[in-house]
Amino acid sequence: MRPQRPLMRSVTHASLRVLVALAGALALHAAAQPTPDAEGALPDMPAARAPSSAELGVQTVEIPRSAMKDAEDAPQTLTAYWVASPVKAPAAGAPVVIALHGCSGLYTQAGADAKALSSRYRGYAQWLGARGYAVVMPDSFGPRGKPHGICTERYASRDINGATRRADILATIRWVAAKPGVDARRIVLLGWSNGAQAVLEALDAGRAWPAGTPPVDRAVAFYPGCASVLRRPAYQINAPLLLLAGASDDWTPPEQCQALQTAVLARQPQARFELEMFGGAYHGFDGTAPLKERNDVPNGRRHGAVMVGGDPAAREAAFAKLAAWLDAPRP
């Protein structure tokens, strides 16, 4: 019997290791799930702590050059990040949000891969996943050698422009539509700042929509720069659009977006173009970072200095509006 004791001790230790590993896996799984309130409802806003990329189950994917036929400067592949929803998809497949980063890019300064995804995009991915949406985040900057963004570049000198990002959107739509388990009739564009401007570019009904590319179901633009499309005398939209802006934004002035809405509805009286303005809110109001001044931005009203940061009241109102826009059978 004595010779068996070390063996039993070894088995016990192995069992403990299995239990510890199982507990860790369950903890990661639980952290990645949506957290309902006391009544079991969906979360109103992303959690204060965004889950890590590992907790979300982020997958790094590559959109091949063959899908990027609209881009003049197409990289060999366009890196993107796919996050499946934890909610069981309907028989028609999962709806998908194409999330388009701002001028800072997708990443923190810690890196340029899935592990370094900004908390903003991870938080949104979890919130959208709770509503049944899969999320794909194409990286327009990293494959072109600027993973940490172009915010400090003047608008006129940027070589990654609206046409570039529109081509990336079209390539991503085609990639999504070919993915099994996806409902290609329910593709949503959601962008922030520079990414929101890319949304406006993609929705330009004056430009031919490529054959074989499914149409966009609806779109959301958080505080875009509206000046470039406003200058187009015939600009119209090819999908319902919700535009969310801070009334005090001194980086992307909201007055230009008000003028854009007026112009579009004059040309397209039946178009669905909603504009929500949040009083006292600045650029980035949907985040949780404290309001601060940035002095490294050569654009905006004050030529080098802009205010950026979250606004709790505007954030809450914006997410309520966003949820209603996404949940509506047809905006």
Image (spheres, helix red, strand yellow):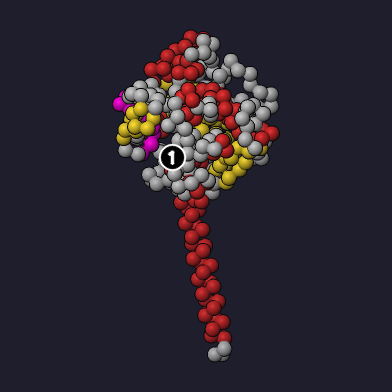
Residue at horizontal 51 percent and vertical 13 percent from the top: 232
Query: Whole-percent x and y of residue 166?
Result: 57, 26
The quarter of the picture where residue 177 lies is top right
**From where the camera sits, is residue 118 visible?**
yes
Residue 118 highlighted magenta (yes or no): no
Q: Which of 305 and 268 is in front in this view?
A: 305
Residue 279 highlighted magenta (yes or no): yes
Question: Is 295 rendered above or below residue 41?
Answer: above
Dominant secondary structure of the magenta stretch?
Answer: loop
Task: Determine crowd level at label 1: few under 14, some 14-19, many 20+ residues with C-alpha closer than 10 A.
Answer: some
User: For the residue marked with disc 1, what is the amino acid?
Assistant: Arg
Which region of the structure is painted magenta? Answer: 278-288
The quarter of the picture where residue 224 lies is top left
Question: In the figure, is residue 69 to the left or right of 135?
Answer: right
Q: Nearer the viewer, residue 187 or 229?
A: 229
Query: Whole-percent x and y of residue 225?
Result: 44, 23
Residue at horizontal 67 percent and vertical 33 percent from the top: 67
Residue at horizontal 47 percent and vertical 32 percent from the top: 150
Query: Whole-percent x and y of residue 3?
Result: 57, 88
Look at the image and tell me in which quarter the N terminus lies: bottom right
The residue singled out by tag 1 in the image is 120
Question: In the figure, is residue 216 to the left or right of 156?
Answer: right
Identify the secondary structure beneath mark 1.
Answer: helix
Question: Is 75 rendered above or below residue 197?
Answer: below
Q: Which of 50 and 319 is in front in this view?
A: 50
Residue at horizontal 44 percent and vertical 43 percent from the top: 108
Number of numbered discs on residues: 1
Residue projecting furthest to the bottom: 2
**From where the camera sits, is residue 329 visible?**
no
